[in-house]
Image (spheres, rainbow, N blue to C red):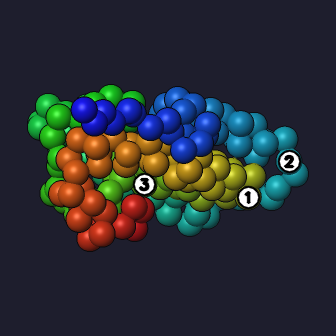
Amino acid sequence: MNTVEPQAPSTTLTTMKIHPPLLAGALVLVTLALHFMLPEARSVGWYPVMGLIVVGSGVAMMFFAAAIFQARETTKNPYGEPTKFVVQPPYTWTRNPMYLSFVMVLLGLAIFFESIAMLLAPAVFYAVIDRMVIPREEETMERIFGQDYVAYKDRVRRWI
């Protein structure tokens, strides 16, 4: 009798549980502290307006993407077991609109505060989520949804 044993995750990085909202919040606090500690010019101009537009767009997409999961009664928890495979906008433009939304919010805050230090937040968030969270989610999606998910990955980019 042939048995298939579950494979261990490929790296220890994908086994660490990272909660994206907590990561984003911690990055905001750390980079905001850096922003106020480092000597940077501070002025009011168009940057706050542009920053708020980017933040607002990110928040809107985040709530829209999360509402789709809620309506389909599938998990938003990156460590949960999805029950539905959602393929409708914005999931036809990017496989990870909620994570992209976090990047937009963090980038918008950096623009709003005109802060070079705060540009660390979206860069670090992107790197951590791309290397430590998404690979695990993709393994789960492939295991549950098989070739349908593999074909989806071929059609839709991970980010944008």
Which residue position holds label 1?
116
Q: Nearer the viewer, residue 144 or 82?
A: 144
Residue that sits furthest to the right in the current view: 39
1 vs 3, front mark = 3
Q: Where is residue 40 shown, x and y percent of the image?
A: 82, 55
Residue that sits furthest to the left in the current view: 72
Inspect the image, locate mark 2, and give the three-letter code of the amino acid beneath it.
Leu
Q: Measure the alpha-carbon separation of dots 1 and 2.
A: 10 Å
Q: Hey, which quadrant is residue 57 in on the image?
A: bottom left
Upstream in the sequence, badge 1 or badge 2?
2
2 vs 3, front mark = 3
Q: Nearer the viewer, residue 158 or 140?
A: 140
Disc assigned to residue 83: none
Secondary element under disc 1, as helix, strand or loop, is loop
Q: Look at the picture and state if 142 lies above or below 15.
A: below
**Left or right: where 26 falls relative to 55:** right
Which residue position holds label 2?
38
Q: Where is residue 83 shown, x and y percent of the image?
A: 17, 34
Q: Measure the alpha-carbon separation of dots 1 and 3.
A: 20 Å
Q: Nearer the viewer, residue 103 or 34?
A: 103
Secondary element under disc 3, as helix, strand or loop, is helix
- Residue at screen point 64% across, 49% down: 124
Inspect the image, locate mark 1, and give the three-letter code of the amino acid beneath it.
Ile
Residue 56 visible in the snapshot: no
Q: Measure the alpha-carbon separation of dots 2 and 3.
A: 28 Å
Q: Nearer the viewer, residue 5 or 21?
A: 5
Upstream in the sequence, badge 1 or badge 3?
3
Quadrant for the C terminus in the image: bottom left
Residue that sits furthest to the front in the current view: 1
Q: Within 10 angstroms of label 1, few (less than 14), some, or many (20 or more) residues? A: some
Disc assigned to residue 100: 3
**Left or right: where 40 falls relative to 1:** right
